[in-house]
Amino acid sequence: MRKAFVAVLLFSSFAFAQKDFPGAVILTGTVEQFNAACKADLDNARTEITRLKAMKAPRNTMQTLQAFDNANLDISFAADRASLAQEVEPDESMRNASEKCGQDASALSTEISLDRGVYDAIVALDISRSDEATKYLVKQTLSDFRRSGVDRDEPTRARITALNDELTKIGQEFNKNIAKGVRTASFTPAELDGLPDDYIKSHPAKDGKIVLNTSYPDYIPFMKYAKNSAARERFYRVYNQRAYPENMDVLKRMMAKRYELATLLGYKNWADYATENKMIGNAKNAGDFIEKITAAADSRMKVDYAELLEVAKQDNPAATAVNPWDSSFYSERLRATKYNFDSQVVRPYLEYNHVKDGLFGIVSKMYGVEFRKAKDAKVWHSSVEAYDIYDGKKNLGRIYLDMFPRENKYSHAANFFLTPGRAGTYLPEAVLVCNFPDPSKGPALMEHSDVTTFFHEFGHTVHLIFSGQPKWSGYSFQWDFIEAPSQMFEEWTITPSTLQLFAKHYQTGEPIPTEMVKRLRRAQEAGKGLGVRRQMSLAALSLGLYNRDPKDIDTDQMTQMVTEKYTPFKYVSDTHFQTAFGHLEGYSAFYYTYMWSLVIARDILTEFQKDGFMNPAVAMRYRKEVLEPGASKPAAELITKFLGRPYNFEAYKRWLDQTE
Ligand SMILES: [Zn+2]
């Protein structure tokens, strides 16, 4: 999710009614229409700011804030639409137009954030008799202003503006290189030995060669199942080179400019700046948190690794280490032998359409909502589906599912706002972008990990929709909380009673046997320590690239250092994973937030564990007390209300130690 200089379309020149969902209409029009919509939104924002500044002091609090919020929302319309378009538009000229629109929206956002006239108007407002939601908005807004550098002298503000504009472009370049960085590797039919039949069938050989690409549906099964270690090594190396060498230099520039900006604003480094408005508060706390988790997972990681090495020794008795490209493969074998679990046997129960319908059913029952297919919705690609979410007669918003890989599309899984909402004025439009097996190409049997990703992302989708009509659009989410609702929802994919609601054999319709789910759980637990430490290596990389002066940082060395300090695996020279690690742009220094959110998620789950995962009473309370308030209150306050106490580390520690 993006940060807010976010922002109402009341004053937009696009006179759509709520039900029209203008975002996708604009996205599916011509480049000229897209550009005109972008310009109209940004012009509207400027008009609002001009109107605000022209109001005579003492200004009316509500009118001033409304003008400011309208401006923010107008900018968000343009910016959110542009950042989605950049990742999903099939048409290159639209992607280019969206890149330009994103830059213009960012530039205007920076301009307003450094506008002393706007700041002075808001500082002078009397909010002593305003409601809590408005007081919180003003507090957040003034803090954002100060963090932007509005109170600096003119030359400093000019430099801040230049740096922000440069950073927008650098960020776009970094992401574009990753999106474009799909690489291919060719294999002989024999090298596909071990892969499932449907995988082999959907990848036929041409002239004796099978060309695979680095998208998830090609890469991940290969690393798990292909028996040939040399072939896995070849694919691993190609995969970890996706945005190399292009992003080596882009990353260095991004780190340097961020450091310059942070120090200009009076912070020691970018990490201190980026963590200041999070739950964690500063970079030192982030580092301490990483070390706390690292220590808590240490014994578990060692056990996991020893088990994996034991399995690797079956093929090579002299082995003293597990190669990184062998880790998925031996994890699979470990699951098959020690835990009597073969992840391929689960796949027939996880056909994409069953999973999707099942997920909708679960969300409907828990939260008392209904998904209605929006048949006439405009979509940017024929495979994209749109649904409206209804609570009784009330439409809460629209979601789009863009679920299958295609050229030039975002290669991971994420949620985007297409259009943010605001109470009484606009309904939210959220977009789920994933890369799952495509049912138009035969039975789309998902890996269980795909299903986990689907539920994770849908946890975000539900959060976006339920919180999608705030009183003010200008609230910003605390990023170290936003992964809690998504990670919590993953538990529904590993609990027999909820998994069985939708995991039915695609040929026989039999639900997945309870005993198989239990084995799946045990098998998943097997690699938990390694998984947590892998996450800590990524968190340490994200923090380490930003918590010091970057001029002497060699990003390869840093990647090697964190790999070898936090995981038992050797760094493979010439792989340059960091160049394709998209979070280094979007999350910058705060990748730790996933684990921080997981600590919170595990504690929130205790309420569902007490009262039942499908219990509408607890789910509804969660919807009302945590999801709907969204960013309108500090996250810790919402969690404390839901739990009846502040959250703590205990549930996470129990999760870390559990073995089934
Ligand atoms: Zn997430």
Image (cartoon, grey):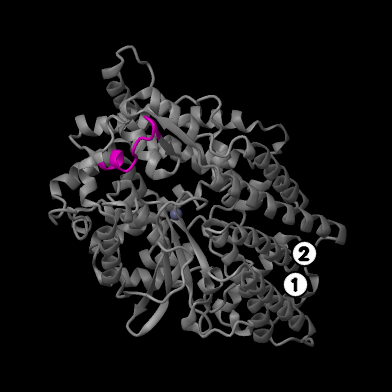
Instruction: Decide which of tag 1 and tag 2 comes sooner along the chain.
Output: 1
Q: CA distance from mark 1 to mark 2?
A: 7 Å
Between 656 and 584, the one lying in front of the other is 584
- Image point (32%, 75%), residue name: 369
Q: Is residue 284 above or below residue 498?
A: above
SS at mark 2 in the image:
loop
Task: Please name the amino acid that badge 1 sits on.
Answer: Tyr
Task: Please name the amino acid that badge 2 sits on.
Answer: Val
Mark 1 near mark 2, Cβ–Cβ under 8 Å? yes
Left-right relation of 363 to 68? left
Q: Is residue 331 above or below residue 140?
A: above
Task: Name the image quarter holding residue 315.
Answer: top left
Magenta segment, which residues? 198-210
Q: Give the image location of residue 288, x and y in percent.
A: 53, 41
Q: Give the image location of residue 646, x and y in percent.
A: 42, 60
Q: Give the image location of residue 618, x and y in percent.
A: 29, 69
Residue denoted by label 2: 150
Task: Name the image quarter holding residue 47.
Answer: bottom right
Quadrant where the C terminus sits is: top left
Q: Give the image location of residue 306, x and y in percent.
A: 32, 24
- Image point (22%, 59%), residue name: 502
Q: Is residue 259 above or below residue 630?
A: above
Residue denoted by label 1: 119
| Ligand 1 quarter of the rendering | bottom left
Between 271 and 527, the one lying in front of the other is 527
Identify the main secondary structure in magenta.
loop
200 magenta-colored:
yes
Left-right relation of 443 to 570? left
Q: Specify few, some or many for label 1: CA neighbours under 10 Å numbering under 14, 14-19, or 20 or more.
A: some
Between 414 and 560, the one lying in front of the other is 414
